[in-house]
Image: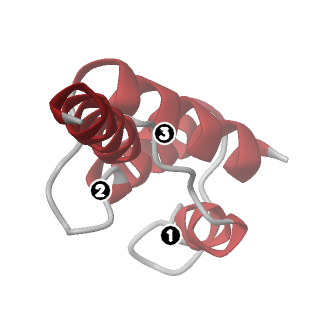
Amino acid sequence: MNRIVTTAATLVGFIAATALFSPISVSPALAQSCKNEAMSKDGKPLAGAAKTSAIKKCCETAAVSKDGKPLAGAAKKSSVDKCIAESST
């Protein structure tokens, strides 16, 4: 009986850790807002490297977990890459 309880507890812990540390997907609305934020001070859309830089900065700022903590490592890279790809289209 103890072995079953221990196995179940291990499985629950693994599932919780997987959910906690999995990359968080960026919603299309967030990527769209990053695209819209790529504007100059006078309200004109940015182009070229300035646009790319503005979108990347926005996406890095938006890379947070469900509980609002900043992502790090592979999760952050995945989130930023997805946001940039969605904003560039």
Kind of residue sitting beneath label 1: Glu
Disc 1: CA contacts within 10 A as few (<14), some (14-19) or many (>=20): some
Q: CA distance from mark 3 to mark 1?
A: 18 Å
Q: Are marks 3 and 1 in contact (CB under 8 Å)?
A: no
Kindly give the residue lying farthest to the right in the view shown.
89
Disc 2: CA contacts within 10 A as few (<14), some (14-19) or many (>=20): some
Kindly give the residue lying farthest to the front in the view shown.
1
Disc 3: CA contacts within 10 A as few (<14), some (14-19) or many (>=20): many
Q: Which of the marked residues, 2 or 3, is nearer the chain's N terminus?
A: 2
Q: CA distance from mark 2 to mark 1?
A: 21 Å
Return the residue at label 1: 37
Residue name at image x 74 percent, y 48 percent: 86
Q: Secondary structure at mark 1?
A: loop
Residue 30 appears in which quarter of the rendering? bottom right
User: Foreground: 78 or 38?
Assistant: 78
Residue name at image x 38 percent, y 35 percent: 18
Kind of residue sitting beneath label 2: Ser
Residue 17 appears in which quarter of the rendering? top left
On the image, the x and y values in percent for residue 55 come to 50, 48
Return the residue at label 3: 79
Q: Secondary structure at mark 2?
A: loop
Q: Is residue 20 above or below residue 49?
A: below
Residue name at image x 16 percent, y 33 percent: 2
Q: Secondary structure at mark 3?
A: helix
Residue 31 appears in which quarter of the rendering? bottom right
User: Foreground: 18 or 61?
Assistant: 18
Q: Which of the marked residues, 3 or 1, is nearer the chain's N terminus?
A: 1
Kind of residue sitting beneath label 3: Ser
Q: Nearer the viewer, mark 2 or mark 3?
A: 2
Q: Is residue 15 above or below residue 46?
A: above
Give the number of the disc on residue 65: 2
On the image, the x and y values in percent for residue 40 come to 46, 66
